[in-house]
Image (cartoon, rainbow, N blue to C red):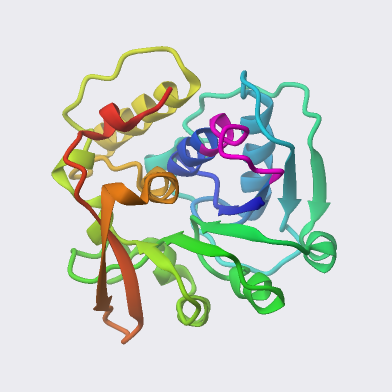
Amino acid sequence: MKLVLFCDYGLDDAAATVDVLSHSVEDGYEEVVLVAIGGNVPPSISLRNAIRLVSNCNFNYAPVTVVDTTAEEQPFEFLASVHGGDGMGDLFRDKPFHAKVLSFREWLNAFSGEYYLLSLGPMTLVPALLRKCAPKKFVFMGGNIAEEPNFQGYEFNHALDKEAFKEAVAYPHTAVTMDSCRDPFLNIQNEKIGGDSLLLRIVARARELTLMSGEKGCYLWDDIAVKYLRHPNWFTIRYGEDRDGNELTYAKFVHGEKYLKLLDL
């Protein structure tokens, strides 16, 4: 089984990727594909951050392919106040990188086989993969049902490409929405974070930046989607309709443990 992640490499994408890669051998993935897209940062910075992140992973992980989407037209913002000056918390230095890098079209044309899909950014390029072959599981972070929106009246990933979002959610899915993430147990803003693991360093930096920016609450949005993928029993499934009439199957956290207790380091 392959796992495909679409990530717009900010800090929560970094946390989600480290979480996935650190368990990728245990979870039996033959390959993890990191599609570096625009969203939190421009596509070129997302690509650089994906490469930089993988090169800093100091543990064993399944074979990785990084997909370069810089030739594809796609929306983005640069949320430096949330994700740092380099888009990924200014935590990482360049190190030797040995994984395979393919262009989006080259990778998509050759793609085949069974896979799980985890979409953690705007959906612009996701429908192209869904049209080619449907995943065994499709989990995404995006959308909101009842929670207060965080970007132009929408959840950020939804806002950046509403049409692609609408097309993607017509496929069977589980959404980790703002309603999923804004749970008191998952808010780390008032938590003390210690330890020097790569994941804890990312989580601590995300908390630090939200305190500096004045955000109300700190949630590792994209890593909560990873938690659903790996531990669906920590959630219940609900159904709702967003403000555009999209019908969402979404996860609600019910495990009752704080986020830091859920980190399997």
Report whether 258 appears left or right of 203: left
Task: Give the number of callouts.
Answer: 0
Q: Which residue is found at the position 85% from the left and 61% from the top?
A: 106
Report whether 48 appears left or right of 14: right
Up-down relation of residue 58 to residue 143 (above or below):
above
Up-down relation of residue 62 to residue 239 (above or below):
above
Q: Which residue is found at the position 31% from the left and 66% from the top?
A: 250
Q: Which residue is found at the position 71% from the left and 76% from the top?
A: 132
Up-down relation of residue 15 to residue 234 (above or below):
above
* Magenta segment includes 47: no
Direction top: furthest residue: 195
Q: Quadrant of residue 260?
A: top left
Can you give x and y, in whole percent of width and height, for residue 160 in the image? Answer: 46, 69
Can you give x and y, in whole percent of width and height, for residue 217 in the image? Answer: 20, 42
Report whether 76 appears left or right of 28: left
Up-down relation of residue 105 to residue 228 (above or below):
below
**Nearer-the-camera pick, 249 or 214:** 249
Q: Quadrant of residue 11?
A: top left
Can you give x and y, in whole percent of width and height, for residue 185 in the image? Answer: 17, 39
Q: Main secondary structure of the magenta part?
A: loop
Q: Which residues are magenta?
A: 20-31
* Magenta segment includes 22: yes
Q: Which residue is found at the position 71% from the left and 58% from the top?
A: 69
Looking at the rendering, in which quadrant would you find the C terminus?
A: top left
**Nearer-the-camera pick, 101 or 77:** 101
Can you give x and y, in whole percent of width and height, for residue 6 in the image? Answer: 58, 56
Q: Quadrant of residue 131?
A: bottom right
